[in-house]
Image (cartoon, helix red, strand yellow):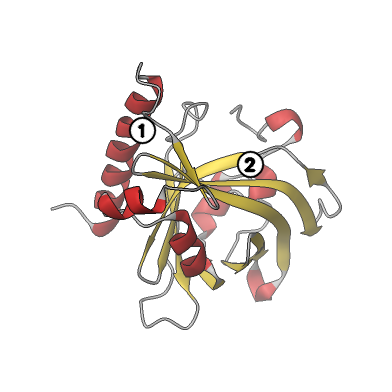
Amino acid sequence: MLSRTSWSVLALGVGVAVWAAGVRGAEPNVGRTDRIGANGRQEASKAQGVSTPEEDLARMQGTWERTGTPAAGQAAGQAEAMRRAVKVIEGNRETVTFYGEGDKVLNAHKVEFKLERYGPVKIFTYYNLEVIGGPNKGQHRPQEQRYIYQIAGDRFCESWGFLPGQEARPPILYVWVKKGSELQSPTAPQGGGERTASERSGPAGEVKGRKQ
């Protein structure tokens, strides 16, 4: 029997297949993007039973946490394993801090982001990344990076490796838990090794150890 995480990954895969088919289709209205502030899209979203970007943005506000594992850190080539990560979202800005043993700050960055939809698939796109903590402090990367997201109750799911251009990236699912919720402790990533956002994206879109 599939676990909850397995079902989540399966659902994401199916959703991406639907999205990709729509984007590549010949019909001009298939695969259109729903963005925050777009007119006339909220009713269509409600009719499909999918929350709007505005609704998702409201749910995202606040502090989220997840844990890491020594194995994940070693797989990513980190000198020190990430023990936990904290994501704080205020409006359309996000700050993420990664902590090691004894709550030592390994890496911290802040970004701006936008939420989009392609059919039922929800896309989180961030840009203007600025490293504000750790050995790479001061670096700035304006290019966009994106992943599939989903919000389910007090869980924020972040999935990499399913979008066009990410074919060489092993699929991975991060599950963040809203701080103060009654759910179990945030889970370690499912799939590939642990990497911070500033490690995932390098100059000209290059990823340390991998190409996007």
Q: Which mark is residue 200?
A: 2
Residue 67 can be seen in this image = no
Identify the residue at the far right of this view: 138
Q: Answer with left or right where residue 139 lies relative to residue 62.
A: right
Which of the 4 quarters of the picture holds residue 30? top left
Circle 2: element type:
helix
Q: Give percent across and percent down for residue 124.
A: 53, 48
Which of the 4 quarters of the picture holds residue 131? bottom right
Please give the count of numbered marks on the rendered protein.
Answer: 2
Q: Amino acid at mark 2?
A: Arg
In three-dimensional space, the C-alpha distance between marks 2 and 1, rounded to whole angstroms, equals 24 Å
Q: Can you identify the residue that label 1 sits on?
A: 19
State the quadrant of the C terminus: top right
Q: Nearer the viewer, residue 18 or 164?
A: 18
**Which residue appears at 33% of the width and 25% of the height?**
21
Which of the 4 quarters of the picture holds residue 177? bottom left
Q: Residues within 10 Å of mark 1 (few under 14, many from 20)?
A: many
Residue 83 can be seen in this image = yes
